[in-house]
Amino acid sequence: MDKIVIEGGHPLQGHVTVSGAKNAALPIITACLLTGGWHRLENIPRLRDIETIIRILSQLGVAFEFEQNSLRVNSGQLSGHEAAYELVKTMRASILILGPLLARYGRAKISLPGGCAIGARPVDLHLKALAAMGVDMFLDQGYINARVDRLKGAEIFFDTPTVTGTENIMMAAVLAEGETTLRNAAREPEIQDLASMLRDMGADIEGDGTHTITIRGVKELRPVEHIVIPDRIEAGTFMIAAAMTRGEVHISGCRTDHLSAVIEKLEAAGAEIQTIEGGVTVKGPEIMNSVDVRTMPFPGFPTDLQAQFMAAMCLAEGWSMIRETVFENRFIHVSELERMGADIEINGGQALVRGCEHLLAAPVMATDLRASASLILAGLVAEGGKTEVHRIYHLDRGYEALEKKFAGLGAKIWRQSE
């Protein structure tokens, strides 16, 4: 098992390029189940979660060819419909294969998924929607067993906006009989990227990016070439890191229209941000202002950047209030930041952060994917020695070579065996 070691105190300077979005790539890869033939997907990040979905689909008979960040996918020779517990338990996004399998083959057996311990992300919204589309389901020994002759279009209302639920049912509906309407659908850019690919495949979809999505089922789809959008969470992580290290970093390959809430908060904190075509430049302030943040579904401030922004507020002047409204357990990184000298008080779904003059290097343990990034950001500014971030297998699920990218910006950071 590896750890990340950081010697803090070095402002980030230079240029970095953002990888493709993990949360867009995962549903796009599973969408290849909807038709045979070779799809070509570009800008696929090399991550553990991507490896996991490839292993799951490979066990079903899907063929893959990987060349750098280009992935070719062919599900024409599918030989199974069961996703085993051993792989599904490591990643909640595995549930995304349920909709495409039922749409094309009418059968699926999938273990209930696992993943980061950041709170309950039940799949009942997925199952309720599929039942409304005519699917017969039962749970047996931790597996979802589902069967349908052909999916029927339906009116679906999500009790709460769900990204994977919206994606799953959207993929199911493209081959269903009749029209499906998703109400209170999620609006994230990753959903719009999936819809764009599905339309290129021949699907009839409109309304993505709004709370009402309409899908009219078609009889068949075709394989396509598609370029995955850049990772807005990785871009936001670099933006926050540049600001809190008092550095100046040009971040290319990102879309500022996906980062409006992050830009607004960083500018309020005192950072200078210049947006240009295909990128953004962030210059950190000498003294960071305290800023309150409330996580919200897109286009609000993303929950996946809450931990990183909290690390920055640990050095801000004054008090800031961080409110988490998406996941109930997403403050589990706080105790590790406190080991580094942070002054944070938790009260239910909010954290009161009192800025301090500096953080101190310490050994810390990552508890989930985004907590890993927040501890690395804290290590970039920590004084008094080396920060060691342990259990970084979480980090490898969602960031492509993060320590190498930071090193390219002048950080003293490296990966080391335990």
Image (spheres, rainbow, N blue to C red):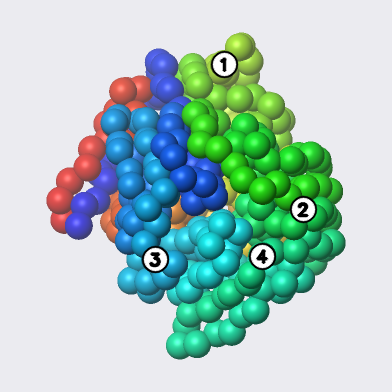
155 or 370: which is nearer to us? Answer: 155
Where disc 3 sits, the SS reads loop
Which residue is identified by label 1? 278
Q: Residues within 10 Å of mark 1 (few under 14, many from 20)?
A: few
Q: Are marks 1 and 4 in contact (CB under 8 Å)?
A: no
Q: Residue furthest top?
A: 276
Residue 195, given in percent of the width and then of the height, sits at 66, 40
Q: Is residue 386 left or right of residue 46?
A: left
Residue 37, given in percent of the width and then of the height, sits at 44, 40
Residue drawn at the location 23% of the way across and 38% of the way down: 414
Which residue is identified by label 4? 150
Residue 94, given in percent of the width and then of the height, sits at 47, 61
Decide: is 147 above or below 311: below
Q: Are marks 4 and 2 in contact (CB under 8 Å)?
A: no
Which residue is identified by label 3? 80
Q: Residues within 10 Å of mark 4 (few under 14, many from 20)?
A: some
Q: Amino acid at mark 4?
A: Arg
Q: Quadrant of the C terminus?
A: bottom left
Q: Nearer the viewer, mark 2 or mark 1?
A: 2
Cα–Cα gap, marks 3 and 4: 18 Å
Q: Are marks 1 and 3 in contact (CB under 8 Å)?
A: no
Residue drawn at the location 58% of the way across and 74% of the way down: 147
Q: Residue furthest bottom?
A: 141
Residue drawn at the location 53% of the way across and 62% of the way down: 105
Q: Amino acid at mark 1?
A: Gly
Q: Nearer the viewer, mark 3 or mark 4?
A: 4
Q: Are marks 2 and 3 in contact (CB under 8 Å)?
A: no
Q: Amino acid at mark 3?
A: Gly
Which residue is identified by label 2? 185
Q: Is residue 332 left or right of residue 193?
A: left
Q: Nearer the viewer, mark 2 or mark 3?
A: 3
